[in-house]
Amino acid sequence: MTVQADLEKLIALCEATMGNYSLMASSTEEQEAKDTFNSMKSDIKQHIQFLNDRLKYLKQNNELNKQ
């Protein structure tokens, strides 16, 4: 179950990071930096989706959850 707890912590951290990227994108006036932060936000959304999918898989297939 440690892996699941670690994934949950990582997802929360990634979501916080995504929020920081959004804040940085909206706070800067330089278009190139704004675009980069938005690109980073898009990338981390994909990472979060993978992590959520992995967590869902583990919850459904973990033998400890089936007892």
Image (cartoon, rainbow, N blue to C red):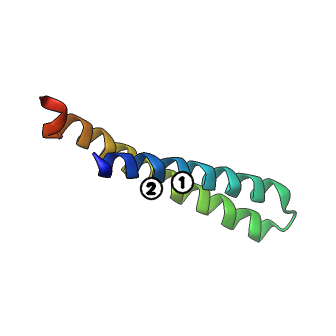
Residue that numbered label 1 is attached to? 14
Given the image, on which type of amino acid does mark 2 rest?
A: His
In the rendered image, residue 51, in percent from the top left (x then y), is placed at: 38, 50
The 10 Å Cα crowd at callout 2, few under 14, some 14 to 19, many 20 or more, is: some
Residue that numbered label 2 is attached to? 47
The 10 Å Cα crowd at callout 1, few under 14, some 14 to 19, many 20 or more, is: some
Nearer to us in this view, 59 or 32: 59
Q: Could you tell which of marks 1 and 2 lies nearer the N-terminus? A: 1
Q: Which mark is in front, 1 or 2?
A: 1
User: In whole angstroms, how far apart are the C-alphas of marks 1 and 2?
Assistant: 8 Å
In the rendered view, does 50 fall on the left or right side of 41? left
Residue beneath the point at 55% across and 53% down: 13
In the rendered view, does 36 fall on the left or right side of 31? left
Residue beneath the point at 52% across and 59% down: 43
In the rendered image, residue 22, in percent from the top left (x then y), is placed at: 71, 52
Relative to 21, does residue 5 appear above or below in the rendering?
A: above
In the rendered view, does 64 fall on the left or right side of 37? left
In the rendered image, residue 2, in percent from the top left (x then y), is placed at: 31, 50
Residue beneath the point at 75% across and 70% down: 32
Mark 1 touches mark 2? (CB < 8 Å): yes
- Which quadrant holds residue 33? bottom right
Residue situated furthest top in the rendering: 67
Assign a secondary structure to mark 1. Answer: helix
